[in-house]
Image (spheres, coloured by chain):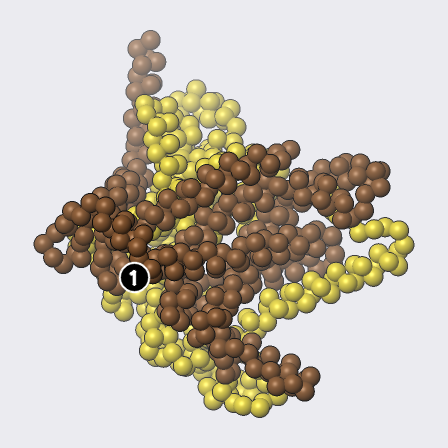
Chain colours: A yellow, B brown
């Protein structure tokens, strides 16, 4: 909920970033590198080699835990406890136990957790992007009394930690009798000031001429929004979509608070529950963890450049 | 004239229609709860008894005297040590990746992986890595010892009070060093005007001098931005990892402020007290942000 607390003071910076016209096109600007000395080619080459191996070493230590995770998830349970095995046995199972990945689905209602996570994340993402875009359009382009005061109200709440609203929202949902329902999982996640703020900043950077022309032709606001604003804002919408989806896919605390029956668990809570009952079945736990990460990993690997541009655009911290 | 009035009314109506869904949700799940939370912080309520009892400032007075709260504040600050470490690492990485070496894209992808895969699954992985008997880390320490013919044994990372926080810091650095901050630094480095370096070179500056005279001041807005966001995030951090890996232990040494709020509200049903803590948390964040802005904001160089 309140992950995206943003500092108002940095507003300027964001506008600057969003205003960059070369957004999404490769920057041709000569990169301002801290050049390695260019005196002798030999020295330069050796410096580059050292740098390369440094980076390689770093990359190996970044990737090692993941590789070990894959290896563990494919091992015999007994193998990971084995003493005095050769070091490479850490990384390569004696026999590949693909069965671990199948077993997870039987030991806990993993399929149910998975479906819940997909459903909840999709609803939150769609709801947030749709309502934020509409509100952002009103704030960015339409004149109405109280607009600036209202927008300031949105901004002001962005400084407030999610922990502040968490407790009253829980009490409110309890009052409605919504505890342990999908409504409780989804609805509070949809409405954030953050999404509205970010999209408004982006809409402000769009050229106005098209809209003016459409208005003269008697186009309704609905059509302007749908046919002009949204198509022009695909990058910003995609960014908000991705980060919202990832945020709700990973969210542990909120489902933990509002849901108590297994059939409503999302993956993070389900995994925590799995750990609680099968805490020492490490091979199964790692297989389950792998399956939780996989969708995010795939999305990332296929949209990497877009992730990078999205971060630059918004400067969000996940 | 009348037409214009009608257009204006139309615009206002349209605006409220566009705004309505978000505004309703915003009022229901943000604005009203913020006010309600403030009210809650002055009452005692366990949700079960007849209703909230007004206790005035008692929650806040209790909080100041609560040794656990002070301890958990300290824990939160201690764990925030990972911020400067990973920021320095991110900058170094960004500089290295900005040298146009072969394989930069692959490196960037690999370094970014831990950030993308954060969450429960990764904390579970690290709980296993830190396992004292067959975890990756201690196995490697022991093997390293064997190679040197020494008997090395790693600590009980997560169950030893002295090691649990360092363990969390190591994990956080691994997680964030190649992530958002590095990407922001990389973008900032690429935005430094080329001619500034040329000018510095004409003056005979070496790489080190060029870094401090050109790069560092030029990227200071990014540093300031990252530091601000990390601080705001840092004060609210630490729930997921502690919940999965240590349960807040050993002996409360990994419980952070947010975890204490969670426990008070949803384990012990002390709603009023939890709300009071959340407001103190907000106050801390607010003061730190303002102070930081006042003292360091001036020195930030905006090109």
| Residue A246: quadrant of the picture | bottom left
Q: Where is residue B279 in the image (x, y as percent from the top left)?
A: 32, 46
Q: Badge 1: how crowded within 10 Å, few (<14), some, or many (20+)?
A: some
Give the residue at the far front of this rendering.
B65
Identify which residue is drawn at 51% across, 31% down.
Answer: A206
Identify which residue is drawn at 90% across, 54% down.
Answer: A40
What secondary structure is found at the residue carrying circle 1? Answer: helix
Q: Where is residue B203 in the image (x, y as percent from the top left)?
A: 83, 38
Q: Position of residue A295 (x, y in %)?
A: 47, 63
* In the rendered image, the vertical position of residue B161 relative to residue B67, given as above or below: below
Q: Mark 1 points at which residue?
A: B263
Give the residue at the far top of this rendering.
B1
Query: Closer to the camera, A111 or B38?
Result: B38
The chain that hosts pointer 1 is B
Residue A25 showing in the rendered view: no
Task: Give the side of residue A164 with respect to residue A282, left or right.
Answer: left
Identify which residue is drawn at 38% across, 78% down.
Answer: A279
Identify which residue is drawn at 57% across, 57% down.
Answer: B86
Where is the N terminus of chain B found, in terms of image quarters?
A: top left
Q: How many numbered marks are there?
A: 1
Give the residue at the far left of this rendering.
B50
Residue B52 showing in the rendered view: yes
Where is the C terminus of chain B found, in terms of image quarters?
A: top right
* In the rendered image, the vertical position of residue B19 relative to residue A109, given as above or below: above
Q: Position of residue B215 (x, y in %)?
A: 70, 43
Task: Give the side of residue A219 with respect to residue B269, left or right.
Answer: right
* In the rendered image, the vertical position of residue B145 relative to residue A228, given as above or below: below
């Amino acid at each position: 909920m309140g992950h995206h607390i943003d500092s108002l003071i940095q507003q300027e910076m964001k506008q600057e970033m969003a205003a960059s016209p070369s957004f999404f096109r490769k920057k041709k600007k000569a990169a301002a590198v801290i050049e390695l000395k260019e005196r002798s080619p030999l020295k330069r080459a050796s410096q580059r080699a050292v740098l390369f191996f440094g980076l390689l070493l770093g990359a190996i230590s970044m990737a090692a835990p993941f590789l070990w995770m894959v290896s563990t998830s494919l091992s015999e349970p007994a193998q990971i406890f084995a003493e005095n095995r050769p070091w490479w046995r850490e990384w390569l199972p004696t026999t590949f136990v693909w069965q671990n990945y199948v077993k997870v689905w039987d030991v806990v209602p993993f399929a149910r957790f998975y479906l819940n996570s997909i459903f909840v994340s999709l609803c939150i993402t769609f709801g947030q992007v749709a309502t934020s875009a509409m509100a952002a359009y009103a704030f960015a382009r339409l004149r109405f009394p109280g607009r600036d005061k209202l927008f300031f109200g949105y901004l002001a709440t962005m400084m407030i930690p999610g922990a502040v609203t968490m407790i009253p929202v829980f009490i409110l949902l309890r009052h409605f009798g919504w505890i342990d329902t999908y409504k409780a999982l989804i609805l509070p996640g949809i409405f954030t000031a953050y999404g509205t703020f970010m999209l408004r900043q982006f809409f402000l950077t769009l050229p106005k001429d098209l809209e003016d022309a459409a208005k003269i032709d008697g186009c309704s606001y609905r059509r302007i929004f749908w046919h002009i604003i949204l198509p022009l804002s695909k990058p910003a919408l995609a960014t908000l979509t991705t980060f919202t989806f990832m945020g709700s896919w990973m969210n542990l605390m909120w489902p933990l608070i509002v849901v108590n029956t297994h059939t409503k668990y999302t993956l993070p809570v389900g995994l925590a529950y799995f750990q609680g009952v099968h805490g020492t079945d490490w091979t199964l736990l790692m297989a389950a963890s792998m399956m939780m990460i996989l969708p995010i990993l795939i999305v990332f690997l296929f949209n990497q450049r877009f992730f990078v541009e999205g971060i630059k655009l918004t400067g969000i911290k996940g | 004239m009348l037409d214009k009035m009608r257009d204006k009314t139309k615009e206002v109506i349209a605006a409220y229609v566009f705004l309505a869904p978000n505004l309703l949700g915003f009022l229901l799940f943000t604005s009203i709860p913020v006010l309600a939370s403030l009210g809650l912080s002055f009452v005692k309520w366990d949700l079960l008894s007849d209703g909230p009892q007004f206790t005035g400032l008692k929650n806040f007075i209790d909080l100041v005297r609560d040794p656990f709260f002070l301890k958990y504040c300290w824990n939160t600050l201690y764990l925030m040590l990972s911020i400067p470490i990973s920021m320095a690492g991110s900058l170094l990485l960004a500089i290295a990746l900005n040298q146009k070496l072969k394989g930069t894209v692959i490196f960037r992808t690999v370094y970014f992986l831990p950030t993308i895969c954060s969450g429960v699954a990764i904390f579970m992985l690290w709980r296993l890595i830190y396992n004292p008997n067959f975890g990756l880390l201690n196995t490697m320490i022991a093997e390293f010892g064997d190679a040197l013919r020494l008997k090395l044994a790693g600590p009980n990372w997560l169950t030893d009070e002295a090691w649990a926080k360092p363990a969390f810091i190591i994990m956080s650095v691994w997680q964030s060093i190649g992530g958002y901050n590095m990407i922001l630094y990389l973008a900032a480095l690429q935005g430094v005007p080329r001619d500034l370096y040329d000018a510095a070179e004409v003056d005979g500056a070496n790489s080190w001098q060029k870094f401090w005279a050109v790069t560092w001041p030029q990227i200071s807005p990014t540093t300031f931005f990252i530091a601000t966001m990390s601080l705001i995030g840092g004060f609210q951090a630490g729930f997921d990892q502690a919940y999965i890996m240590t349960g807040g232990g050993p002996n409360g040494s990994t419980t952070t402020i947010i975890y204490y709020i969670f426990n008070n509200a949803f384990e012990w049903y002390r709603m009023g007290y939890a709300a009071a803590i959340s407001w103190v948390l907000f106050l801390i964040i607010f003061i730190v942000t303002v102070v930081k802005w006042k003292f360091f904001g001036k020195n930030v160089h905006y090109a």
